[in-house]
């Protein structure tokens, strides 16, 4: 029994000694850090007159964070080089260089999307004029271009501030995950969207995603500040007030060419940029609707099947023939192809059918009036 108690006492003493050694090491490390910080603070007091220091670790500053010794320097750096989601907005405040650069990038993004839409429109017009592409392929091509525009916008926004990128990505992610059909495995996560999941959405869902992203980009590009009010208190503080001069003033000289036609101010340039951005967005939407209309509406009488693209010779070889629709603007090799294409062709078919009925009724009215004229002449005779 005494041996067991002695062994326990020895074990506890060894544990206490190791713990004390560990605590001494930790205390020594903390002490060394405190001494190092103290020396750094003293050095800053001698060189900059203050012991305070700030570091910026946002986005591109994360690898080599700049150091500031006053809060004013840090504030100027943030408002100049970063778009902060909590940055206060004052009415009439001139845009910072970071905001101006962001709007220029968003305007360029809108122009890029508009150029892509124009190229697709030209290709579809050229090939659809020859009627060499089946309707099914044209529709699938339009879907593919919509997916490409969504990916282009998200890829450009990925290089912007995290708060701006999240405002575009997170709602689209939730919408995609909610609209994927049940029973289909999703590959997208809560923070990352996968290209394959976009292909599972319907055409209407893809168009809604594209419309939302275009609205976000337009908002970032065209949200310009209002013209500055000369009665604003901030502007009054910046104005230099001079005492009126009582000495006689010389006669005013005629205005020079620069005075007669002054260069545009910053407010004029911002307003011009805003109108250009609105025009670009309107052009993007117009081209998108034109692409969809050309993909969904035939522009001439079709020779092949409007759904599968089967030629008359291929249909004859299979023992069938191409049947014309009641509008005579489309042909189908089977009732299945006609029913599949009816949702797309319905509006065009009804339009041509009503137009043809109206022409026939006009001819009948003309013929009836001629008969009445002849009967009246015979009665008078």
Image: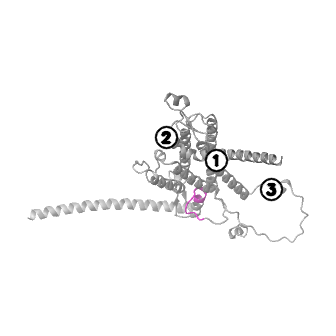
What segment carries the magenta color?
77-88
- Disc 3 target residue: 262
Q: Is residue 127 visible?
A: yes
Q: Of marks 1 and 3, which one's residue comes earlier in the chain?
A: 3
From the viewer's perspective, tell me whether residue 283 is left or right of residue 2: right
State the separation of the CA atoms marked 3 and 2.
69 Å
Q: Evaluate if marks 3 and 2 touch, with contact meaning CB atoms under 8 Å apart.
A: no
Q: Nearer the viewer, mark 3 or mark 2?
A: 2
Q: Is residue 235 above or below residue 377?
A: below
Q: Nearer the viewer, residue 340 or 244?
A: 340
Which numbered disc covers residue 336? 2
The residue sitting at 54% across, 45% down in the picture is: 342
Of pointers 1 and 2, the one earlier in the residue sequence: 2
Q: How far apart are the two marked residues, 1 and 2, measured between alpha carbons?
A: 24 Å
Q: Residues within 10 Å of mark 1 (few under 14, many from 20)?
A: few
Residue 83 in the magenta stretch? The answer is: yes
Residue position marked by numbered label 1 in the rendering? 354
Residue at 13% over, 63% down: 6
Could you tell whether 276 is left or right of 334 in the image? Answer: right
Percent coordinates x, y for residue 250 in the rendering: 90, 64
Q: Is residue 191 visible?
A: no
Between 51 and 317, the one nearer to me in the picture:
317
Residue mark closest to the camera, 1 vs 3: 1
Disc 2 packing (10 Å; few <14; some 14–19; many ≥20): few
Quarter where residue 356 is shown = top right
Q: Report x, y in % for residue 73.
A: 59, 61
Q: In terms of depth relative to the viewer, which is nearer, 210 or 158? A: 210
């Amino acid at each position: 029994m005494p041996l067991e108690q002695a062994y326990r006492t020895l074990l506890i003493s060894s544990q206490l000694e190791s713990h004390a050694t560990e605590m001494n090491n930790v205390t020594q490390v903390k002490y060394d850090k405190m001494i190092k910080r103290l020396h750094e603070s003293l050095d800053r007091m001698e060189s900059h007159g203050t012991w305070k220091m700030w570091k910026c670790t946002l986005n591109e500053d994360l690898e080599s964070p700049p150091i500031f010794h006053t809060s004013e320097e840090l504030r100027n750096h943030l408002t100049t080089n970063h778009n902060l989601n909590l940055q206060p907005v004052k009415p009439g405040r001139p845009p910072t260089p970071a905001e101006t650069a962001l709007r220029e990038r968003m305007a360029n993004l809108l122009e890029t999307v508009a150029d892509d839409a124009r190229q697709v429109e030209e290709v579809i017009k050229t090939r659809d004029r020859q009627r060499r592409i089946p309707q099914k392929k044209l529709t699938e091509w339009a879907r593919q271009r919509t997916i490409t525009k969504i990916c282009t916008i998200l890829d450009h926004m990925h290089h912007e501030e995290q708060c701006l990128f999240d405002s575009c990505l997170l709602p689209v992610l939730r919408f995609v995950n909610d609209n994927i059909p049940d029973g289909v495995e999703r590959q997208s996560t809560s923070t990352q969207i996968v290209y394959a999941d976009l292909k599972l959405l319907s055409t209407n869902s893809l168009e809604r995603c594209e419309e939302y992203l275009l609205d976000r980009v337009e908002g970032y590009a065209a949200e310009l500040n209002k013209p500055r009010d000369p009665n604003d208190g901030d502007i009054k503080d910046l104005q230099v007030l001079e005492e009126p001069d009582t000495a006689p003033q010389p006669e005013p000289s005629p205005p020079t060419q620069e005075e007669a036609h002054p260069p545009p101010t910053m407010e004029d340039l911002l307003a011009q940029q805003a109108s250009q951005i609105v025009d670009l967005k309107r052009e993007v939407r117009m081209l998108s609707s034109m692409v969809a209309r050309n993909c969904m509406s035939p522009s001439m009488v079709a020779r092949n099947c409007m759904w599968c693209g089967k030629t008359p010779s291929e249909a004859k070889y299979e023992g069938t023939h191409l049947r014309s629709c009641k509008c005579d603007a489309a042909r189908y090799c089977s009732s299945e192809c006609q029913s599949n294409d009816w949702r797309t062709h319905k509006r065009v078919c009804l339009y041509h059918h009503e137009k043809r009925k109206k022409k026939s009724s006009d001819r009948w009215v003309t013929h009836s009036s001629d008969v009445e004229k002849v009967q009246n002449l015979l009665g008078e005779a």
